[in-house]
Image (cartoon, rainbow, N blue to C red):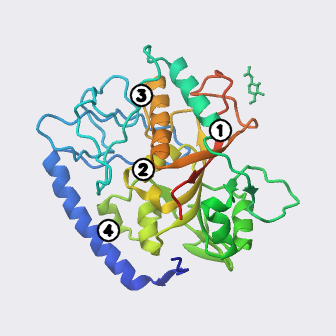
Amino acid sequence: MLTARPPGRSCGSLQRWLLSAALLLGLRLCVELRRAGYGPPARRGPPELPPPHLLPAPGPPHGASRRQVTYVRSRRRALPGGAGRVTPEPSCCAPRGRPGRKGPRWHIELQPWAGPAQSLDEEASRFLSYISTTQIACDHMGTDSLATDSIPAKKPWLVCLDDRFGLAHQIRNKQCRLYSLGLGSDDIRFEVSMANDGCEVHRFDPSVKSAHVLESEHLWHHRLSVDWRDPHPAVAAQKPHSNTRKLGSILNEFGHHKIDVLKADLESAEWKVLENLILEDVLEQIGQLIFEIHLHWPGFEVSGSDSSVVRFWYSLLKELERKDFRLFHSYKDLSKPQLFLKKDVFNASSCYTLSWVNTRWK
Ligand SMILES: *[C@@H]1O[C@H](CO)[C@@H](O)[C@H](O)[C@H]1NC(C)=O
């Protein structure tokens, strides 16, 4: 199942193939965009910049197909109460994603409001209790995997090593693969110890010095930043080595079909990345998820009223549950500012680390 094919080998033909695929895709996209009357997708600023305050895209215009372009600056009037992109309401009659349907979805389904007032209080209370309540018991949780580390881990990156979930078995057979998505983080103890246990570890971080570095037998560093969209085809054609990619594209590029553990600390890009993994069904290829989530502001390209932002976050996590992921660990980081959407309210932290296990993982 797991072929440890170091990326970089056989790159020539792969790159040629990717290039032509990108060009084809670009052409197709241009035609579609023109037909739908949309401009080019908006670009995301670097993480240090304040969030681009994008208007939520409106619902599908009359007669238009549902193939909406997700990342669009629109001059049209925004729907009230939207966050992220908004499913038109009422959603009773909108065509829903049929189970088993193939091909990308364009919207996640928003959960009903937490209460009749559609207030921040109601939304926050539902959301915070949701992320603080584990959904499945894990008897053997590993910090830093199976290794005995004398220095206590700074962050509780925990995997579930219960036999029923298969990860322990994969580690014993040296058949596990960890993807770690980061933005300039230098704490890689979790990655190092997973690699020491024999896992194939791929760390993605735009601050890595060169394109692909093999640090030790099992530990790769890649100068790639995982995003929720691929570069615009026109940009990709000029800069085939652009270092921003969707996770699904990286998996294709590396020829990987499965990730046993996906760790992500994306400094507020996690919401859009998670949305992308849901919309493109990449979650099915992942065994366990460890995400650091950030609550001090809505996150990159998430906008709307405070209550609708929280409803959007909640809806994303409910999608995980729908995909048979169960929360087995929740860690509230008390060392970070205790801020929730810029306010010191609800006794919330701005930062939580959440671990889920895919209960269908084999
Ligand atoms: C606030 O959070 C801290 C840390 O989780 C907890 O110990 C404390 O009991 C909470 N306070 C209230 C009033 O809920």
Up/down of 175 relative to 60, above or below: below
Mark closest to the chain's N terminus, 3 or 4: 4
Mark 1 Cα shell of 10 Å, populated few (<14), some (14-19), many (≥20):
many
Residue shown at 22% from the left, 47% from the top:
67
218 or 208: which is nearer to us?
218
Most foreground residue, 242 or 360: 360
Name above or below for residue 353 compared with residue 298.
below
Q: Which residue is disc 1 drawn over?
A: 351
Of the numbered discs 3 and 1, the one sitting upstream in the chain is: 3
Q: Which of pointers 1 and 4 indicates the residue nearer the eye?
A: 1
Cβ atoms under marks 3 and 4 closer than 8 Å = no
Q: Which residue is mark 4?
A: 237
Q: Earlier in the sequence, mark 2 or mark 4?
A: 4
Q: Residue furthest left?
A: 63
Three-letter residue code for mark 4: Ala
The three-letter amino acid code for the residue at tag 2 is Ile
Label 2 and label 4: CA atoms lie apart by 27 Å
Residue type at numbered disc 3: Gly
Residue tagged 2: 278
> Which residue has dot 3 on it?
304
Task: Give the spatial CA distance, label 3 vs label 1.
Answer: 20 Å
Q: Which mark is residue 123?
A: none
